[in-house]
Amino acid sequence: MLIQQAHLLDGRIVDIRVGAEIEEVAERLTPRRGEDTFDAAGGTVIPGLHDHHVHLRAAAAALDSVQVGPALVHGRAELAGVLAHAPVGEDGWIRAVGYHESAAGPLDREQLDELTPAVPVRIQHRSGVLWFLNSAGLAAVGLPDHPDGRLRSYDNWSDAVARRDTSLATVSRRLLGYGVTGVTDATPNLGANDIVTLTEEHRHGGLYQRVHWLAPGKRILHDDSLDLDELTAWIAGRHRDNRAVALHCVTASQLVVTLAALRAAGTHRDDRIEHAAVVPDDTIAELADIGVLVVTQPNFVAERGDQYLIEVDPDDQPALWRLASLLAAGVRVALSTDLPFGDADPWASMRAAVHRTAKAGAVLNPSERVSATTALTLFTGHAEQPDVPRTIEPHQPGDLCVLSAAPAEVLDTLDGELVTATVIAGHLHVP
């Protein structure tokens, strides 16, 4: 197809011929016989956005789960009320997501039995790494004698839970509306069947975005089971097979142990650290020196910043969700939303990177702000090289985002409402 009269971020107005790749970019291009055309009318065209860390199946499942986060639940009585009225799925479960202790305190099996109906219930922590099950739920997964009902995500218990046939189409259409043309699925323990299923959904039109995979090299770390020698051996084994690793680091301890393990095992060019939610001062230079990619989510500053300001010691707050200091030190960085544990809107994540403003208006770590151009560019990396931005020129992927405004307004507002069309492999999708 041919996109006409498109503003590029550098100010040029061009026509763009695009198929699986961008074929031509010129001031004027003549439409070919039978070629589809789209008039950008002076609006901006950028490379399609790529969200470098999402969980597709979890995002689809969250659509028909009840939300029990602190924004909606205030105390045990409200939590009990939400669960009492929650629909029971065809699999016999009540599924709730987004929980945090600030909503109704710590949860365990005994408390859930008091709060929940006599059917299997599982509540996912908003971090995505922990589930809380009541006694009926524990019996359903073959763990009737489990002491507290607090189970880690992606451990063997989850194999006993029937996977619901959740369509990804709704999630995919929402991402199209934001100009997202590709995602990297960071779900640990994705098997070959999972990858085949998602690939088929993409092929048959149920999933529009291109999908890149981290599994099986993704690993979630837990502070209570950090083992430097074991982690080093696991990384070294992956590297011997010429495979990269992606390590989930949300605490300072996890990051410090990960860096030590990478230093001991050596690095692969595609190694990644996911999240890097807490980056102490003395680890920044080492991140740069090792050369590992950091995929982080500034959207959590906006989504959870008010809570951080209350719960995190003021001396530790400067280490939260760093961005400008990482880039200044030469750390390789790309951005993502962590959908569904973060909001799906990459434009909101860009705004958070630029402004660092929490919901109530407080600013968290203003020194970590970056420019709008930088924030946007960090969502346009190649799937295989997230820190290498794609460009509007021949032989680049034919994945584009068309916006209704000129570049100055796009960068000033960073608003997904400006997206008028999304192009994937030369195929036009209008929200």
Image (tube, rainbow, N blue to C red):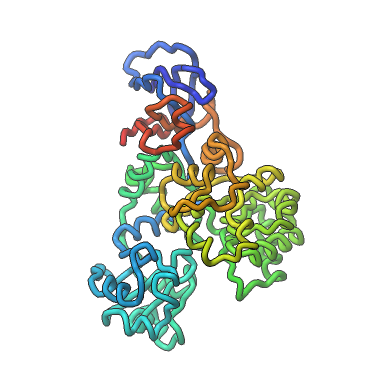
- Given residues 87 and 29, the one toward you in this image is 87
Give the residue drawn at x 45%, y 44%. Answer: 346
Horizontal placement of 213 versus 242: left or right?
Answer: left
- Given residues 158 and 350, the one toward you in this image is 350
> In which quadrant of the rendered view does residue 81 lie?
bottom left
Q: Tell me: residue 136, above or below residue 16.
A: below
Q: Residue 156, how many percent across, how many down?
A: 47, 73
Q: Tell me: residue 335, above or below residue 265.
A: above
- Given residues 265 and 97, the one toward you in this image is 97
Q: Residue 332, how many percent across, how many down?
A: 65, 45
Q: Tell me: residue 82, above or below residue 240.
A: below
Q: Can residue 54 be seen in this view?
A: no
Give the residue drawn at x 27%, y 80%. Answer: 117
> In which quadrant of the rendered view does residue 74 lie?
bottom left
Q: Residue 231, how many percent across, how many down?
A: 67, 67
Which quadrant would the N terminus be assigned to in this image?
top left
